[in-house]
Amino acid sequence: MSKSPSASAAEGFTFWKKEESSVETRVAVLAIIVRDTASVPALNELLHQYAPYIIGRMGVPYHARGVNIISVAVDAPADAISALSGKIGRLAGITAKTVYAPEDALQQGK
């Protein structure tokens, strides 16, 4: 079973549910640098919307430099990864970059 959420909107929120699908997914890590904590609620809302794709998340506050560093591991269709990274990158005071795992290095999920 691959993760391929379908979206439905209710009162301005997007809800995702897992469905069986043959959509090819990619494994990637989003590296996120937060300089403006005022954007954190919007960042958390985006991550919540893409939760079915998220494998794991780690946040590290770096007080000496005044930033927070977040890494988010995902297994999702390439267009979903790109959309999430782009939306995060448009938030004020937040930078996001994506690194994809080489496809030939991955075993197929079951």
Image (spheres, grey):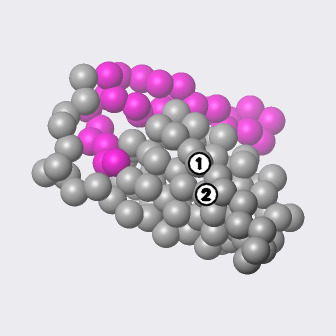
Q: Percent from the top left, x then y, of residue 56?
A: 52, 40
Q: Amino acid at mark 1?
A: Met
Q: Is residue 64 left or right of residue 50?
A: right
Residue that badge 1 annotates: 58
Crowding near pointer 2: few (<14 within 10 Å), some, many (20+)? some
Q: To which quarter of the image does residue 19 belong?
A: top left
What residue lies at 61% left-to-right and 57% top-to-bottom?
70
Q: Amino acid at mark 2?
A: Ile
**Element on which disc 2 rests:** strand
- The segment highlighted magenta reads 1-27
Total numbered circles: 2
Spatial separation of the CA atoms under disc 2 and disc 1: 6 Å
Q: Percent from the top left, x then y, of residue 48?
A: 66, 40
**Element on which disc 1 rests:** strand
What residue lies at 56% left-to-right and 68% top-to-bottom?
96
Can residue 17 be seen here?
yes
Q: Is residue 22 left or right of residue 55?
A: left
Q: Percent from the top left, x then y, of residue 15?
A: 64, 32
What residue lies at 39% left-to-right and 42% top-to-bottom?
75
27 above or below 11?
below
Residue that badge 2 annotates: 70
94 above or below 55?
below
- Say which quadrant the N terminus sits in: top left
Q: Earlier in the sequence, mark 2 or mark 1?
A: 1
63 above or below 75?
below
Q: Say the numbered circle drawn on residue 10.
A: none
Instruction: Looking at this view, name the residue that lies furthest to the right.
Output: 38
